[in-house]
Amino acid sequence: MILKYKGADMLTEPGETFLSVALKRQNEYDAPIILAKIGQRIFELNKEIPDDAALARSGYKSAELSFITTRDRDGHKTYERGATMMFLRAMTHVFGKWISQLKLEYAVGEALFFTVRFKDGTNGDDITDDKLAEIISTMHRYVKEDEKFVKTKIPTLEAVELFRRHGMADKERLFHYRRATTTNVYRLGNYCDYYYGYMPPSAGYIDIFDIERAHGGLLLFLPYHNRPTEPGRKEIPEKLFATMHTSTVWGDNIGVPTVGALNDAISRGDGRNIILSCEAYQEHKIGQIAKQIKEENRRIIMIAGPSSSGKTSFSHRLSIQLKNVGLTAHPIACDNYYVERSKTPKDENGEYDFECLEALDVPLFNDHMTKLLKGETVDLPTFDFKKGIAEYNGNLLKINKNDVLVIEGIHGLNDKLSYAISPDDKFKIYISAVTSLNIDEHNRIPTTDNREIRRMVRDARTRGFSAKETISRWQAVRHGEKNHIFPFQEDANVMFNSASLYELAVLKTFAEPLLFAITPDEPEYTEAKRLLRFLDYFLGLSCEDVPRNSLIREFIGGSVFPVG
């Protein structure tokens, strides 16, 4: 078969695998090749290259071959899944039936956190140094022997029975709602499991990792995403970890730790109760934050978080709770402090960089905030984005001792934005949709997937953007978050998790029609197909019972707040 590769013809032999071709081309890449791609369709490397007829039957007209490395997002996730399966197999090899629970909870920093419980009541903290070394050496043995990840397609009913025999009740529950008649099951040696997404060809590809005890479980450290040949840092963001842990424990307590459990609740008619429980929990958390601000006598509240975290709705709900404790909130948008367009810095591509700190008139912002804290009257600017200048329209503000300023902006947690304000006056809040719900005990839901779907639904509703446009912009959005928000998240006084256990079941009904509109010949099709497969795990849930002050209303519409 003749494929196009980097603009030239490439002849492949009948029955040749993508792996064979990848090995010949590896020296052209700065990171290990881990997946292949024809057109917009991704293939695992162990798969034989399909012929023209097979591609035509699948609806893929393009025969342009490309490769995905561990530096790419899909490649990094593949590495993560391979490392997860190796770790789980090593744990069962070392401890066998002594394990009562082994669950992948979430990603934190460059690590995956697994809770570990043993039948004698001990946990991961009780694993000895010798046993920890044995787990690591067992995984290195898989690497040295280059054990293969073998995929087998079996009837779904057979897969459910397999999960039942192996005590994987969460997968048995999940696949009760699976529509597909067949399921892909992976085997590594004598260990079988199911994974959402692609896998590497063999354990030899997963050669950078380490394991440490932490918080009653184990941390599996992986390479940096953007430097995939270097071991990731060992330090974990403790505040973020604590926020994830709290949300996970709460989800366990109300009986919804996984998608299968959520589907069970929806199918028996308990969807409304799950919605109300989630909303009550968030309202309680917001009330606690307002009380803390009051007790600490903070005057300026700085709020920051990544895209689609629900910052605007959170600000309104916090303002209401502040009123309940005797404080009046005055919102001030950092966007009104942009420098005039002619002074806006440009990025490496010559485009205006509106996300860098230098795009803001930082001295003016500090001058205004310090004057307000002193009790002076300030004429606040309003930035005209069409003209590219700040205008003054008589928006006068003076605050008294029971007033607080609520500042929302990408640089809210960066002290360089508010350098003239005393730390004693500032209260920093980091908000993000930190998903605590998992697909099952071995497959996590990335927080970024949740936010991407939120943004897609909101963009279509408020801006008329297609899902294709949202997906095409998403990586650029994430680039700004990594540079300007995530480095400062641990400096926050509190973190607020805006994710709700039920929301993806609601967002599903809005997102699926948008994603189906993307056609196979478009570059965004690969991501659209991945998200559709992901949403297929969920039963749909009507938005009828979602309260009008919910953060989710910021995305699906119907909010009582002015959020678009």
Image: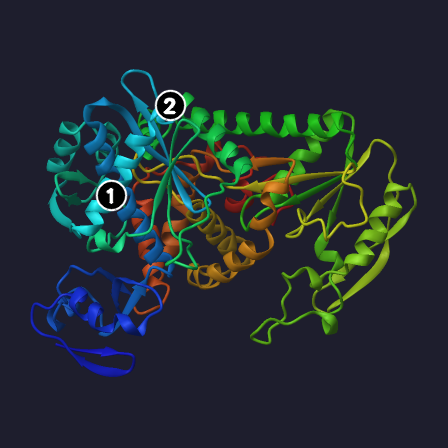
Q: Nearer the viewer, residue 439 or 78?
A: 78
In terms of secondary structure, where does tag 1 sit?
A: helix
Looking at the rendering, in which quadrant would you find the N terminus?
Answer: bottom left
In which image quadrant can residue 263 be found?
Answer: top left
Note whether 273 is above or below 347 in the view shown. above
Q: Position of residue 349 (x, y in %)?
A: 56, 75
Reading the image, the residue beneath label 1 is 139
Q: Nearer the viewer, residue 234 or 129?
A: 129
Note whether 522 is above or below 210 in the view shown. below
Question: At label 2, which amino acid type do we have?
Answer: Gly
Looking at the image, can residue 263 be seen? no
Note whether 433 is above or below 522 in the view shown. above
Q: Is residue 126 left or right of residue 278?
A: left
Q: Position of residue 358 (x, y in %)?
A: 70, 63
In the current view of this chain or complex, which residue is farthest to the front?
130
In the current view of this chain or complex, which residue is farthest to the right?
376
Question: At label 1, which amino acid type do we have?
Answer: Met
| Disc assigned to residue 439 | none
Q: Earlier in the sequence, mark 1 or mark 2?
A: 1
Tell me how far mark 1 sits from mark 2, CA to CA: 33 Å
Q: Residue at x 54, y 32 (%)?
A: 547
Q: Residue at x 34, y 32 (%)?
A: 258
Reading the image, the residue beneath label 2 is 255
Q: Position of residue 94 (x, y in %)?
A: 22, 31
Looking at the image, can residue 378 be seen? yes
Q: Residue at x 25, y 53 (%)?
A: 198
In the current view of this chain or complex, which residue is farthest to the bottom?
8
